[in-house]
Amino acid sequence: LTGNIEVFKGMQLKELNLEWCHNLEGDIQVLAGMNLKKLNLATDPFNGSKLTGNIEVFKGMQIKELNLFRCGQLTGNIDSLKDCPLTSLNLESCYKLEGDIESLKDCPLQVLNLAAAQDRRGQSLSKFTGNIEVFMGMQVKELNLQYCDNLKGNIEVFEGMQIKELNLQPCRNLIGNIDVLKGMQIKEL
């Protein structure tokens, strides 16, 4: 598909799935004021997205599932999402997004993907910061923090959690003993 997402302006959509529509263009500002519960703008791993704009457009929206996988042109701070009732958030490879994960503490997240990659010098491209202690008491089942080198904290925070998938590769600033994972029902690590 090709075209500009401007076509959706003013529509009363509750769900918008444009997954792998990497030829679409436009500013996500056209989504302002929509009553979206699910939004999937993920694109394939080889092309990346042409969509632009600031994620501040989602501030105060009632989105429960937000997938911006490889929307590398989007900008903004994840603080804009703090009042959203997000249960699933995928910001993998959104390298222009930044912010402290503390801002997500009140979201009822069950799935969180903040994974990044490294540049040619081996430096993380992630701009997310904060302490993983924010996850204490959360109901996260899937957590991907791959290459989130700016995150800190002790993995003891995961003890007793019902995590099924966990990726901490190679979060260089996390500490702790993997013994805390003993007995957990993790299916992917």
Image (cartoon, grey):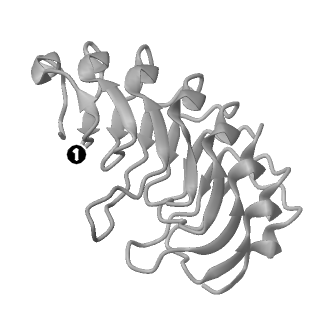
Q: Is residue 172 above or below residue 10?
A: above
Residue 33 position, x and y percent, is 86, 50
- In the image, 102 versus 120, the foreground residue is 120
Placement of the N terminus among the 4 image quadrants: bottom right
- Residue placed furthest toward the right: 10
Residue drawn 65% across the image and 37% down it: 79
**Residue 4 shown left or right of residue 22 in the figure:** right
* 170 left or right, relative to 143: left
- Residue 14 at x, y percent in the picture: 73, 50
Q: Residues within 10 Å of mark 1 (few under 14, many from 20)?
A: some
In the picture, the quarter occupied by the C terminus is top left
Q: Residue at x 27, y 12 (%)?
A: 160
Give 5 or 116, whichever is nearer the viewer.
116
Residue 113: image quadrant is: top left
Q: Position of residue 112 (x, y in %)?
A: 44, 40
Q: Residue at x 74, y 74 (%)?
A: 5
Q: Count the numbered circles shown.
A: 1
Q: Amino acid at mark 1?
A: Gln
Residue 43 lies, in percent from the top left, at 48, 70
> Residue at image x 64%, y 31%?
85
Residue under label 1: 169
Q: Quadrant of residue 180?
A: top left
Question: Please, what secondary structure does the residue beneath circle 1 have?
Answer: loop
Residue at the farthest bottom position: 2
Q: Quadrant of residue 142?
A: top left
Q: Note whether 74 is above or below 160 in the view shown.
A: below
Q: Is residue 137 above or below residue 129?
A: above
